[in-house]
Amino acid sequence: MRTIDLNADLGETVDGVATADDEALFAVISSANVACGGHAGDAHSMAEATRRAARFGVAIGAHPSYPDKAGFGRRPLAMAADELHAAVSTQLVALADVGADIRYVKPHGALYHAVTTDAAHAAALARAVADLSRRLGRGLPILAMPGEISAAAHEHGLEVVAEAFLDRGYTPSGELVPRGEPGAVIEDPDAAAARAVRLARQGTVVAVDGSSVAVAAASFCLHGDSPGSVAAARAVRAALDAASVSVRAPW
């Protein structure tokens, strides 16, 4: 039986208001990327996510970002490497300090994309993860798409785990369609479910031009703040179960 991780971005409260139905999503996923104050989230939401994770048996990942709540972490920021390292470290420590059993780290939004191409920002992120790994006494994997972060993580003896996106469009070259462009977000739960099964069985996705693109991944992501995220998550989980794909966290 094939095993796959199903992750979602959760704990993304903005001014105390949740952007997703965390309770419903925790019930069907295996890993939760918990916002830790950079783009969203606060001490209360982090603690609540930690409690939910324990109740549902879901693994916790830290979800740091550029320090940009106004832009929800989706705007690139030209930060010096030391400044970014400090910002990410602050977020990781904040999540650890509420008692979260952090098992991995996944960067959010613009930072996620930056560490695939920007060596300095990839190194800053990897150094922050290495710092937390030493504090916890175990190496924390980084959940990301391949790129500069792979070499940066290797420098610190850290593993990079590849993921695929169930609710985002892919270009023919295997990159994500930028938000705001046609086909960037997949809102149909059935389409997300079909993609999950295809990825699990064939390791491919259908790009926006209709071509087939190879995507190797150990974890599938759904965005909690996307329209219809709960319906999509339930459809995905049901489809994977029907296809005899076991949903389980690898951390």
Image (tube, grey):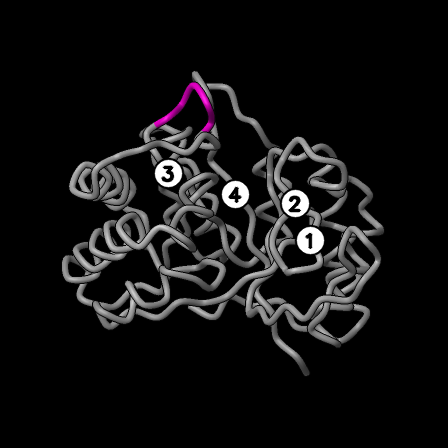
Residue 179: image location, x then y, percent: 63, 35
Between 250 and 99, the residue placed more toward the observer is: 250
N-term-proximal mark, 3 vs 2: 3
User: Which portion, as a residue range, is magenta?
Assistant: 68-72
Contact (Cβ within 8 Å) of mark 4 with mark 1: no
Q: Is residue 5 above or below residue 62?
A: below
Residue 80: image location, x then y, percent: 21, 37
Residue assigned mark 2? 177
Report the mark closest to the observer, 2 or 4. 2
In the rendered structure, which amino acid carries the disc numbered 3? Ser
Contact (Cβ within 8 Å) of mark 2 with mark 4: no
Q: Which mark is residue 171?
A: 1
The kind of secondary structure element at disc 3 is loop
The kind of secondary structure element at disc 1 is loop
Q: Is residue 117 above or below residue 188?
A: below
Residue assigned mark 4? 9
Between 76 and 237, the residue placed more toward the observer is: 76
The kind of secondary structure element at disc 4 is strand
Between 227 and 203, the residue placed more toward the observer is: 203
